[in-house]
Amino acid sequence: MRSLGKDFVKLAWGFLYLVQFVCLEFFFRGFMLNALRPALGANAVFVMCVPYTMIHFPKLWPEAAGAMAFGLFLGLLALRSRSIWGGVAVHAAPTWVSQHPRLGSVRAARHRPIEYGRTEQGS
C-alpha cells in the first residue's frame, strides 16, 4: 500500500510539471505573442522573449542565457505553426528524459541521500 502512495506522488508530480509547461507556453507563446503580433508583427517575438528570459534569471547563467536563444526559437516556432504544442514538447521532452530515471528507477530507490557533515571515514 505504501508503494501505491509513492507511485501516485510520482505521477502527480510529473503531471503537474507538464501542466506548468503548458501554462508557461500558453502565456508566453499563446497569449503574449498573439497579443503583440498585430502591432509588432514578427518583432513580437523579441518583446515576448524579454520577460521569458527574466524568469530564468534566478537560475544558473547558462540556463538564463539559453532561455534567450530558446525563447526566440520557440517564439518563431509558435509564429510559424500557430500553436503552443511545439514549445510544450521542446520543454517537456528533455525534462522528462532527465527526470524519468529518477522517477521510476530501481537504482534511484537504492540511492542514499548525501549526508552533509560526514566524512568518508564515518566521522
Image (spheres, rainbow, N blue to C red):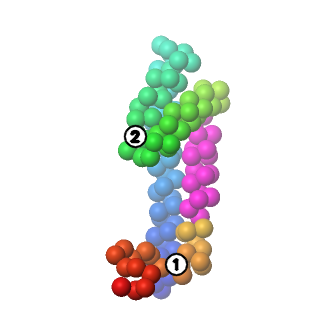
Find residue 117 and report its horizontal and vertical position in percent: 34, 75
Choose top left, top right, bottom left or bottom right for residue 58: top left
**In this picture, is 66 found above or below 118?**
above
The x and y percentages for residue 9 are 46, 70
Amino acid type assigned to the residue bearing label 2 in the image: Phe
Which label belongs to residue 111?
1
**Circle 1 Cα neighbour tier, 10 Å, few/some/many (<14 / 14–19 / ≥20):** few
Q: Which residue is mark 2?
A: 57
Marks 1/2: CA–CA distance = 31 Å
What residue is drawn where x is 60% and y is 32%? Answer: 73
Q: Secondary structure at mark 1?
A: loop
Please state if 10 lies on the left or on the right of 81 as rendered. Answer: left
Q: Earlier in the sequence, mark 1 or mark 2?
A: 2
Q: Position of residue 53 (x, y in %)?
A: 45, 35
Task: Identify the residue at horizontal 47%, vertical 27% (top origin).
Answer: 48
**With respect to residue 63, does 109 lie above or below?**
below
**For this rendering, which residue is in front, 111 or 73?**
111
Residue 112 is at least partly visible in this image: yes
Q: Amino acid at mark 1?
A: His
Residue, x 56% and y 36% (percent of image)? 70
Q: Is residue 95 magenta?
A: yes
Dominant secondary structure (helix, strand or loop) of the stretch shown in magenta: helix
Q: Residue at point 60% right, 27% down?
A: 76
> Across the whole image, how many numbered discs are drawn on residues?
2
Provide the residue span drawn in magenta: 83-100
Question: Taking 123 as reference, is 35 left or right?
Answer: right
Q: Is residue 89 located in the magenta-colored stretch of the structure?
A: yes
Residue 24 appears in the picture as rendered:
no
